[in-house]
Structure formats: C-alpha cells, structure tokens
Image (spheres, coloured by chain):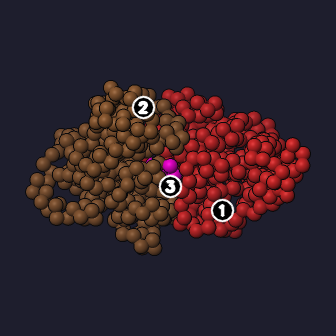
Chain colours: A brown, B red
Amino acid sequence: MGKEKCEKDTICDTCNESSSCNQHEKEAHAQERLKSKLSHIKHRIMVMSGKGGVGKSTISTNLAVALSMDGFDVGLLDADIHGPNIPKMLGIESKHVEGSGHGMIPVEVFPKLKVISMAFFIGDRDNPVVWRGPLKHSAISQFLGEAEWGDLDFLVTDLPPGTGDEPLSVAHLIKDVDGAVIVTTPQDVALLDSRKAVTFSRMLNIPVIGIIENMSGLLCPHCQKEIFLFKKGGGEKAAGEMRVPFLGRIPIDPEMVTDCDRGMPFVIAHPDSEATRAFKEIAYRCKEYVGFKEIGKQYEKERFSYHFKEQEAKR
Amino acid sequence: MGKEKCEKDTICDTCNESSSCNQHEKEAHAQERLKSKLSHIKHRIMVMSGKGGVGKSTISTNLAVALSMDGFDVGLLDADIHGPNIPKMLGIESKHVEGSGHGMIPVEVFPKLKVISMAFFIGDRDNPVVWRGPLKHSAISQFLGEAEWGDLDFLVTDLPPGTGDEPLSVAHLIKDVDGAVIVTTPQDVALLDSRKAVTFSRMLNIPVIGIIENMSGLLCPHCQKEIFLFKKGGGEKAAGEMRVPFLGRIPIDPEMVTDCDRGMPFVIAHPDSEATRAFKEIAYRCKEYVGFKEIGKQYEKERFSYHFKEQEAKR
C-alpha cells in the first residue's frame, strides 16, 4: 500500500513519502533493495579465516586489485566493523562515502575497483566501534542494500575473523555466495582455527574455493637464507585433510608490511615478486572457479590497460 | 521465596528444588553466584587487542604462568569463544571440565594455575562455535559464575580481539577490572587498532596497565642479524601518544611458535631468553600495578618452588 505511493529505488530514510509507510513496509523495501542491488553482482567471493592477524585484509585487497587489473569490475566490501583496515591499505582512509537519494556511493580506488568500509564512517580514527551483533548486522545490511555498487563482476568481501556474528550476517545477507577463500598461517594453532572456518563454510552451504597459506617462510634480507617463522606446509596439509583445494603459499615479505602501511597494493608495487605471482595465481583460481575461464581469455588483450599510481609504484 | 527453599550455592540446573523457583528468581541466583565467586578473586586483569593475531593468547598464557611461578594463585579465563587456543598452548587440549553440584571445575595445569576455555566443551576440534552475541554472553557468564576457581590472587582473562560483544560482556560481568594489558604489533595497521582498544578501555572505565609491543624484531637464526619484520617501536610511540605506560617489547622467536604448538609455556621452556625476560617484566609491572609490590618481596624466597615438566623444558 505504502509502496505504491513511495518513491521507487529511494532509501526510506530519504524518501519524501517516508511517513506513508509503516516499519513493516520499510523492512520489505529494504529487502527488495538488497535483492535488486545483489542482482547486479555476478560473483560473490568471501575471504575468511578462523583466526585474526593471518593477513586476511591484505589478501582480500590484493585479490580485488589483481581481479580489477584483469579488467573486471570489482567491489571490495570491508565487513570488519571493529577493525576496518582496508581503506588504509589502499591509501584511501581519508575519503568519505557520499550519499545520493538512492543510497551511498562506494569510494572509487580506480575505475574498476570500489570500496565500502566502516572506516569511512568513523570520524576519529582512535574511536572504536562498540557495537553488539544486531547493530553490526544492520550496518552490513546497509553496505549491501544501500551501496551503489553498479554492475560488478566480482564482490570480494573481507570478513572479520572467527565464526561469529559478522560472517553469519554477511553469509545470510549476500546469499548465493560463489565461494569462500580461507586464509591461514602455517602454525598448528592457526590451522586449528582454519579447519573450523572450513566446517563453518560447509554448515552455511558456502563452497570452499580453497585454503591459502600466508606468512609461509621468509627470506632473511641480510643473508638471503630462508627462515620458517611460523613453520611451513601446514596449510597444504590442512587442505588435504579437509579435502578442499590448496590455493598456494604467500611468503612473508617485510615490504608487504610497509606497502600496507603506506596504502600501496603489493601486487602493483612489486609486480615481479614471488608474493605477487601467488596473488595472481589465487585470482586466477577464483576466476576459474566461478567459470570466468573463457571470459578471462577475452580480456587477455586489454590486460593491465590501467596502471594505478604507476609512478609511485616504481621503487 | 524460592530462594529459601532451594539449595544454596548450587547451580539452578542441578538443584533438587529447581522447580520451586521461577526464571526471575533463577536469574537473581545466577547474579548472586557470580558476585560470590568474584569476591574470591583479588585481582582481575584483562589482556586485549584491537586486532587479531598479535599474540594475545601467547601473552595471556605466559603472563599467567609467570605470575603463578611467582607463587600466586592464578586463574586463566579464555574468553575467546570462537578461537579458544589457550588449552593447546598449555598442552591440556584433551582435558575436559568436570562438574560438581556447585558448578564446573576448571582444569588445573599445575597447582597454582587453573584454566577455563570453550575448547574444553567442544567435542570435535574442527567444529566451529557458531554463536551470536547473547549466547556468547551466557557462556562467559557461566565461566565466571559457575566455575569453582576457589581463592585466586589473579584472574587473567584473554579476550577475543576487537571491541565487540565478548570484551563488552566480560567487562560488564567481571566488574571492577583492575586493569587492561593491550597487545599490539608494531606496524601502523595494527597500531590503529590498538589505539581503538585504549579508547574502548577508557569508555568502559577500565584502567590501562599499559601497551605491549609483540613481534618486535627478529634475529635471523642463520646470520644473527636483526630483521624488522613488522617494523619496530610503534607500540612505544602509540603508548606515548595515548598517554598510557609502555610495558615492553617481545621479540619474535620461532621457538615461541613451536612451543605454542607443542603446549609448552615459553617462559618455562626458555627461562633465559630475551622474550622470557620481557614476560617477567610485564608480570612484575602487573603486580606492581595492582599493589602487589610488597607482597611480591615476601614471595621472593619461595620463588620458582614449582617446576613444570622440568625435564621436558630442557632442550
């Protein structure tokens, strides 16, 4: 009833006819908007881990950048409400999300990569977001239903660690997730958590694209010998035992820490490094997984047509 | 009314007169039990971080072990519901919590150190705990109100990362927290989150004992030169800027990863290492902070009277 009178595609808070709809109708509108927005997103990938600090945000960021460099339209959703670090890793932490009558406009990193993060909504960077589950669910729901992503080939969602409220919310909201990429570090304690993440994905009927072993070995910058800081090979072993694909190893590179801190995606700053090769391989596996293999070939010619801050990328 | 009839100090679920009390009365009993249990705990320390994977559980474990080696009765509460790793780090992951009519009996690591963790309640180690906020709150409430800790000098609580449901719940439940130890790693992205943790503590009126910089530098095992993997000194800088004490640096030691995985507390396995000195210094600062300075001297003579699996500790 209210629906006929109110403005289509306008979020209820800014609709001129807002008062003519009741709460129930507004919730139905939110659901419709969510459905409509998601229908423009071809493929949905979740990056998750059972444990924090395994480099999930670094991997989400570099995966999204690698996919966009391949010519795909990519959205990157930073679903970590308490520790939203992706904007800092892309050098866009001072940006703000602008609103339109139809919703919020994601921040464009470059034409084929857009980002939404809680960080854009926090005034003081020292302020924590002290929210319980329902409020977090509502925020993630708005990021999905009210963001003007436009047509996307991929939406890469960086989930907060664990198997709690946020991963549950996102999985329930996004629906039809194509697959989850699970990030782990090689030591036993972390592997224990990544195995939980695999089971969690299965419980939610989300296919596991595979496991990535991050922080896998380090070359000493002084003597060039390899140091197994967090041991090595555990990710592959866990993948084998849990019967999910192993997507590859990403070695520790102190440059990666520096790049994250200065807001430069590693795959752009160090195109010939071992870690970049691993990131590209993972991006390839994701494309392959979602059936983009053929379309990928078509894009082959126009690959790397856009160079992000190329001058800065040269060391 | 129900209270007069029912058995004192018995948890309602196992009380023979359970049916004589209504839900409201049972909740009041739970509050009373919580208050009564907490009255036996002299000092309450929370170990927190804004970000996962900074080594919070490792630090909680070694801090608790260091305090108990000093002769104090210590309880270690693993409040990480989704990733409870402390039992593995202490080699007690196969243990189970036993119940009595008065509640659950924490697992004893050695006479002066007891542990409660969600890990003791999960059958299959691969099973994730997929719980939303209210259920997690209820679990933590039971860990505090129904665990038979006995008389404790210190309760060290290892919080899950972030500023969400669990830290909120624990802070609200424990009340009168003596102070929070905040763990960070030195890179900017992690520091951003640790600053949030300081603000979060202040919002909840929990004094900040100080900031620990973990994973601060690494000696190459081949050439013995120092590698600044996650940079260095950021924790001290953040502490200065946020005007909270700086508690010290803990270097990365590949042995620590191995020790965590084999369930051996690092401070026992490597009593003369740089990291152990840092852990002991932090334990000292905590004692000093809660006014145990004088009592500490009294314990001085009987220090290290107990040696945990000494034979195994020798490499």
Q: Have a look at marks 3 and 1 and say if they share a chain.
A: no
Q: Position of residue A286 (x, y in %)?
A: 28, 61
Q: Residue at x 37, y 51 (%)?
A: A174
| Label pair 3/1, CB-CB below 8 angstroms | no
- Taking depth in this image into account, of B73 and A42 the one nearest to the observer is A42
Q: Position of residue B303 (x, y in %)?
A: 77, 51
- Taking depth in this image into account, of B96 and B74 the one nearest to the observer is B96
Side (left or right) of B72 relative to A198:
right
Q: Indicate which disc residue B179 carries.
A: none
Real-space Cα separation, disc 2 to disc 1, in angstroms:
38 Å
Q: Quadrant of residue A45?
A: bottom left
The residue to which callout 1 is attached is B120
Secondary structure of the residue carrying numbered label 2: loop
The residue to which callout 2 is attached is A122
Kind of residue at disc 2: Ile
Secondary structure of the residue carrying numbered label 1: helix
- Taking depth in this image into account, of A300 and B214 the one nearest to the observer is A300
Chain containing mark 2: A
The residue to which callout 3 is attached is A163
Asked whether residue B289 is in view, the answer is yes
| Label pair 2/1, CB-CB below 8 angstroms | no
Q: Which residues lie in the magenta part?
A: A159-165
Q: Residue at x 69, y 47 (%)?
A: B141
Kind of residue at disc 1: Phe
Q: Have a look at marks 2 and 3 and say if they share a chain.
A: yes
User: Pointer 3: residues within 10 angstroms few (<14), some, or many (20+)?
Assistant: many
